Structures are given as C-alpha cells and as structure tokens.
Image (cartoon, grey):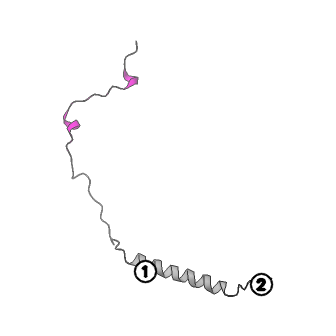
C-alpha cells in the first residue's frame, strides 16, 4: 500500500490561510465605517399618539375588588 505524501500539506494550508486573510481584508476595506459617530438627541422628537390624549384606565386582575 503506497504511503500518503504529506510534504506539501503545510505549504498548501499556509497559502490557503493567507489567501483567505487577504480576501477578507479586501472585502472589509470596501465598507465605509463612520470615523466619529455622534450621539443623537432623542428628546427632540416628540410624537403625540392618540392614547396619550385620551383618558384610559387599565383594569388589572389583581386590582379588582374582592367579592
């Protein structure tokens, strides 16, 4: 039975890892990332919803009177 030649495995695996690394670096470098993200003030936008203007009461089962 012939012996399996593993002498080129190290070179093959190393070149594959390097190729994947460079491919991912090129893929990531095409994306735009903001350098200084500024915090947004959420208190400026006030929305009036219909249930804020109407009187509503929620009856919970625990708040009902006992009989």
Viewer-nearest residue: 9 or 31: 9
Dot 1, how many residues are within 10 Å of its Cα: few (below 14), some (14-19), or many (20+)?
few
Dot 2, how many residues are within 10 Å of its Cα: few (below 14), some (14-19), or many (20+)?
few
User: Quick check: 10 left or right of 29?
Assistant: right
Residue visible at 39% across and 24% down in the picture: 61
Percent across and percent down for residue 23 are: 47, 80
Label whose residue precedes the other's in the sequence (2 or 1): 2
- Please identify the quadrant where the C terminus is shown: top left
**Foreground tag (2 vs 1):** 2
Magenta span of residues: 46-65
Q: How many marks?
A: 2
As for residue 56 lying within the magenta part, the answer is yes
User: Quick check: 12 left or right of 66?
Assistant: right
* Prevalent SS, magenta region: loop
> Which quarter of the picture shows residue 35?
bottom left
Above or below, comparing residue 54 to residue 13 in the picture: above
The residue to which callout 1 is attached is: 26
As for residue 52 lying within the magenta part, the answer is yes
User: Quick check: 3 left or right of 26?
Assistant: right
Percent across and percent down for residue 5 are: 72, 86
Extreme residue toward the top, this view: 67
Percent across and percent down for residue 11 are: 63, 87
- Please identify the quadrant where the N terminus is shown: bottom right
Element at badge 2? loop
Residue visible at 40% across and 78% down in the picture: 29
Residue visible at 42% across and 75% down in the picture: 28
User: Quick check: 28 left or right of 59?
Assistant: right
Element at badge 1? helix
| Label drawn at residue 3 | 2
Above or below, comparing residue 5 to residue 48 in the picture: below
């Amino acid at each position: 039975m012939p012996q399996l030649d593993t002498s080129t495995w190290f070179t093959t695996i190393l070149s594959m890892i390097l190729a994947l690394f460079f491919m991912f670096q090129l893929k990531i470098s095409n994306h735009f990332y903001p350098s200084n993200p500024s915090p947004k003030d959420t208190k400026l936008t006030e929305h009036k919803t219909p249930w804020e203007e109407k009187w509503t009461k929620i009856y919970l089962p625990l708040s009902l009177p006992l009989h």
